[in-house]
Amino acid sequence: MSDSKNYDVLIIGSGGAGLSLALKLADHSVRVAVLSKFALTAGSTYYAQGGISAVFDADDSIESHIEDTLDAGAGLCDPDIVQLTVTHGKSSIDWLREQGVAFTEEQTADGKKQLHLNREGGHSHRRIVHTADATGKAVSLSLIERAQEHANIELFEHHNVVELITRPTADKANKRVVGAYVLDSKQQKVKTFTARVVVLATGGASKVYLYSTNPQSATGDGIALAWRAGCRVSNMEFMQFHPTCLFHPHGQSFLISEAVRGEGGKLILPDGSPFMHKFDARAELAPRDIVARAIDHEIKTRGIDCVYLDISHKTAPFICEHFPTIYKKCLKFNIDITKQPIPVVPSAHYTCGGVLTDSYARTDIHNLYAIGEVACTGLHGANRMASNSLLECLVFAERASEDILQKLDSIAAAPEIPDWDESKVSDSDEEVVVSHNWDELRRFMWDYVGIVRSDKRLDRAMNRVDLLKKEIAEYYGNFRVTSDLLELRNLVTVAELIIRCAKHRKESRGLHYTLDYPETDDSKPAENTILTP
């Protein structure tokens, strides 16, 4: 018996990008399904601490925000996309406030209230709108509540996409997306979802590395799905490593917000001496790639486990008010940040590249869009500036909604799609293969394709990826799909894309640093790396 569901728009991903788009479409009587691989709160948006960059300060300007973003992107940002995104900052914040997001405010000298603005690395002004140090949680919960109340939105938790479904366009010249095969992880059954429009909002791929600030869900699913369907991807060599992740055996993946450095936190060695001034005149406020490489350098050359981030020179009330989440989390591990420095190491944090899109979030496949971290819009270039990510989610959700609403009625309904065929597969009796390959993949990506790379390291990584691909493909072909297997299959695809892009770039630029080409090649205009299936 067929288990098929049909909608106007199918959104894969329930973070800030996906839910924002769902609400914008549903308000226009569009029937929307939102798929969440795990719980609705399991994505990266929920865990985002810092905030959303937007120009509100009278001393700040749109031009300054644009200049800072272009500078961080190391010559690879699309100036038109940067301008488009930055100019929508204030309206994006206003829309979130309308959805019920309560941002941190402060009282002015004349007794009025205004948004409190943090400053983070790479920004020349205070322009980070935030909710204490748990902005993503506030945004996520507000959008989830609105979506749950909306009559035109259906939310599906624990639904993991197996594959996108495409068909030739009427003129046979291209492909259009018509839906997706989706694993219901609770029922262990593959369902068919059809839709006029499909949107990838699946987040990034940082779980391809052994150490990451991201939640378990960040396995590059949307990038792998789009690549297998025939979309180009771009700039996958630019994987951002957040400089400061808590170094503790039970606190892995807990990010220490950039705002700590923005409010005066100092990076120090175990003996208490500072070191960032040796690497950049901006010291702790340098862009993330510079800070992460500086920390990596100190750890490796000195043979130490970590460095420390010290904010204890600020008053205890100030720390507890500005960083309540970080304070409470560290206290659980017997680290009182009002008195002690925080042990930190860099960890994989953000995927600057992704599925290539235009200014309306359209991909190479008709009626397939990509928004948020899964996409490569041209905003981030070779390095994302702090707190531009949630802004990108909001702006491109708005852009995609405009385009979808304008043409939805003209898109033909999806054709009849056959059910998923698993008649020739069986249940696996060797789940250890999945867990072993998952561990091996993430370890060699960390060792060979991490913060500092070389041709030899990339060659080693590619050899291992080729072997894993064959083993995983054989496993996938013989056994029923599970969520873990789907993630592993996607991760190995993403790993290959990262390595291929890194091997293509014969220079160091932004987040891509290689020992064989340590300088930036300024002899010709900077070019984005684009891979075609």
Image (tube, rainbow, N blue to C red):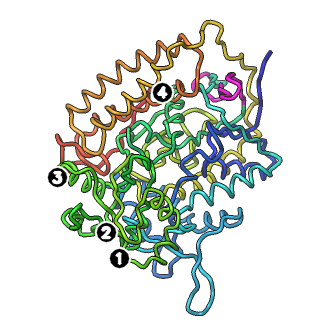
Q: Residues within 10 Å of mark 4 (few under 14, many from 20)?
A: many
Q: Read off the residue under disc 4.
A: 488
Q: Where is residue 338 in the image (x, y as percent from the top left)?
A: 41, 71
Tag 2: residue type? Lys
**Left or right of 200: which side holds 523?**
left
Residue 179 in magenta stretch: yes
Q: Give the range drawn in magenta.
A: 172-194
Q: Read off the residue under disc 3.
A: 302
Q: Contact (CB < 8 A) between labels 2 and 3?
A: no
Q: How crowded is mark 1: few (under 14 residues within 10 Å), some or many (20 or more)?
A: some
**Disc sitting over residue 266 in the figure:** 2
Q: Contact (CB < 8 A) between labels 4 and 1?
A: no
Which secondary structure type mostly characterizes the magenta part of the structure? strand
Mark 4 or 2 closer to N-term?
2
Mark 1 or 3 closer to N-term?
3
Label 3: element kind: helix
Mark 4 or 1 closer to N-term?
1
Q: Where is residue 151 in the image (x, y as percent from the top left)?
A: 83, 47
Mark 3 or 4 closer to N-term?
3
Q: How crowded is mark 2: few (under 14 residues within 10 Å), some or many (20 or more)?
A: many
Q: Residues within 10 Å of mark 3 (few under 14, many from 20)?
A: few
Label 1: element kind: loop
Label 4: element kind: helix
In the image shown, does 322 or 55 lie closer to the viewer? Answer: 322
- Gap in angstroms between the C-alphas marked 4 and 1: 44 Å
What residue do we see at 58% from left, 76% from top?
Answer: 115
Mark 2 or 1 closer to N-term?
2
What residue do we see at 62% from left, 31% from top?
Answer: 160
**Left or right of 66: which side holds 461?**
left
Q: Where is residue 146 in the image (x, y as percent from the top left)?
A: 75, 55
Mark in the foreground, 2 or 1: 1
Looking at the image, is 157 positioned above or below residue 52? above
